């Protein structure tokens, strides 16, 4: 299988200097910090303060492993994740995993749209359902009428708005000693509240939509280079994979950096002032204003809105990729709506369902709990399939996993299965 040179493709695309840093891993890293994740991290920081900060460095290697393996699968096999499952595994496995992932993506997209609208509502006195509709419409039009290159460029720059959380943390004036202790010394409480938030953190940092997006992004990049057939896309050189590892490590470090500062900002302000029960990201932004100042509240809200414009299309498009590949439809953001009508209809249907949920007076946090449960049970088998596929020479040729990558991959898989069991355990505590 012939490899491709990522350096040449980056050069041809005009990437240089700072722009070269904003590669594909940044998009997945930023999308992992979606409004729902921000709400989870804000809730964790407000409830447990600096004692929860250690979860950021601990989850980093797991995040890197799952996203890199998804990227590797897309590069070497030339297929998106669900296309690979469709081609190499029984249909019952495909459908079981598909239902869980699409349901989880749709509910999380709904909650994210609600979170974005609630954050806008802090500054703009317009009803949340109306804002949800407007935001979703803008996102959908971008997906239908924007080119893949345009969408990629917008996503990369939107990702940088997450740096607002570092500013919010600085404005909150955290205690240095408590921060260092909470970062370097893991603290675990064996009670329902702590275990629930710990499982939620693991679940939101290792969400299934990241796997499908990353593998499909690799395929889209190759299609953008003119490799429109499966045969042309198959294969990746060792240098390609090394560059991918660097890109994704930067992206996951960026995601973890933001996760850390979200927990730090709410821990240093809300937890310290006794406001320990925060349920949404917008609520955290509003609560920060009188404690850490209007600037901190504004930065927190701005980050929610900006990253939502990145994360929601990742979820809705990811669900459409999964459906299209499972059904054998043509599905690509490089194709027009006329060339891949069913793919874009799938994006539209998922978006409409997500919008509709915000008109049903549903509790977005409760919906996220159920989404997390579904994701918690669908993500472990999905990662198990990724591990099996990236060790299958029929699919990967000579680029099967190394011993070191297998050690990281199987450890992460075990950790995710353990998190799912812990989630079940919390129901009985």
Image (cartoon, rainbow, N blue to C red):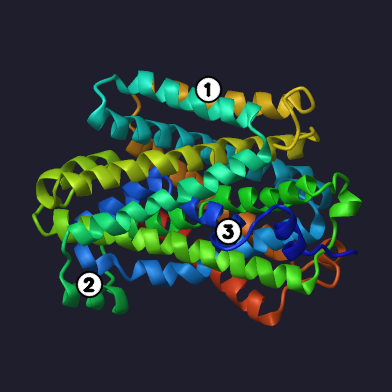
* Location of mark 3 (residue): 25
Determine which of the numbered discs, if any, sits on residue 384 in the image: none
**Around disc 3, counting alpha carbons within 10 Å, would you say few (fewer than 14), some (14 to 19), or many (20 or more)?**
many
Query: Label 1's element?
Result: helix
How far apart in space, not on screen, are marks 2 and 1 (Cα)?
42 Å
The reply to whether callout 3 and callout 2 are in contact (CB within 8 Å) is: no
* Location of mark 2 (residue): 179
- 41 or 421, which is in the foreground? 41
Residue 408, above or below 291: below
N-terminal of the pair, mark 3 or mark 2, is 3
N-terminal of the pair, mark 2 or mark 1, is 2
How far apart in space, not on screen, are marks 3 and 1 (Cα)?
28 Å
**Around disc 2, counting alpha carbons within 10 Å, would you say few (fewer than 14), some (14 to 19), or many (20 or more)?**
some
x%, y% of residue 77?
81, 57
N-terminal of the pair, mark 3 or mark 1, is 3
Q: Residue at x 17, y 47 (%)?
A: 288
* Location of mark 1 (residue): 352
Q: Is residue 290 visible?
A: yes
Query: Label 3's element?
Result: helix
Viewport quadrant of the N terminus: bottom right
């Amino acid at each position: 299988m012939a490899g491709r040179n990522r350096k040449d493709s980056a050069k041809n695309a005009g990437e240089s200097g700072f722009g070269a840093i904003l590669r594909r891993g940044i998009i997945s890293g930023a999308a992992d910090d979606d409004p729902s994740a921000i709400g989870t991290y804000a809730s964790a920081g407000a409830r447990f303060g600096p004692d929860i900060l250690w979860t950021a460095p601990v989850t980093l290697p797991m995040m890197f492993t799952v996203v890199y393996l998804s990227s590797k699968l897309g590069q070497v096999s030339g297929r998106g994740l669900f296309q690979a499952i469709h081609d190499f595994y029984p249909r019952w496995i495909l459908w079981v995993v598909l239902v869980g992932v699409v349901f989880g993506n749709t509910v999380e997209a709904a909650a994210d749209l609600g979170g974005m609208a609630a954050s806008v509502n802090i500054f703009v006195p317009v009803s949340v359902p109306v804002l949800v509709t407007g935001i979703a419409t803008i996102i959908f039009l971008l997906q239908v009428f924007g080119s893949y290159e345009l969408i990629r460029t917008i996503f990369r720059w939107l990702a940088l708005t997450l740096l607002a959380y570092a500013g919010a943390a600085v404005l909150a004036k955290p205690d240095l000693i408590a921060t260092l202790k909470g970062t370097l010394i893991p603290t675990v409480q064996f009670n329902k509240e702590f275990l629930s938030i710990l499982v939620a953190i693991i679940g939101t940092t290792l969400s299934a939509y990241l796997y499908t997006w990353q593998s499909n992004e690799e395929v889209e990049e190759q299609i953008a280079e003119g490799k429109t057939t499966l045969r042309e896309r198959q294969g990746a050189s060792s240098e390609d994979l090394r560059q991918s590892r660097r890109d994704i490590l930067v992206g996951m470090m960026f995601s973890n950096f933001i996760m850390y500062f979200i927990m730090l900002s709410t821990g240093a302000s809300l937890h310290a002032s006794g406001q320990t029960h925060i349920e949404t990201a917008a609520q955290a932004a509003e609560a920060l204003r009188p404690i850490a100042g209007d600037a901190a509240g504004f930065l927190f809200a701005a980050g929610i809105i900006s990253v939502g414009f990145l994360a929601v299309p990742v979820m809705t498009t990811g669900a459409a990729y999964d459906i299209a590949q499972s059904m054998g439809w043509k599905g690509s953001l490089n194709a027009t709506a006329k060339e891949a009508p069913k793919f874009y209809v799938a994006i539209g249907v998922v978006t409409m369902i997500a919008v509709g949920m915000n008109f049903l007076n549903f509790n977005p946090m409760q919906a996220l709990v159920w989404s997390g449960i579904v994701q918690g049970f669908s993500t472990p088998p999905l990662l198990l399939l990724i591990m099996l596929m990236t060790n299958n020479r029929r699919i990967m040729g000579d680029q099967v996993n190394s011993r070191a990558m297998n050690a990281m991959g199987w450890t992460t898989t075990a950790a995710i299965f353990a998190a799912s069991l812990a989630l079940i355990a919390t129901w009985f505590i």
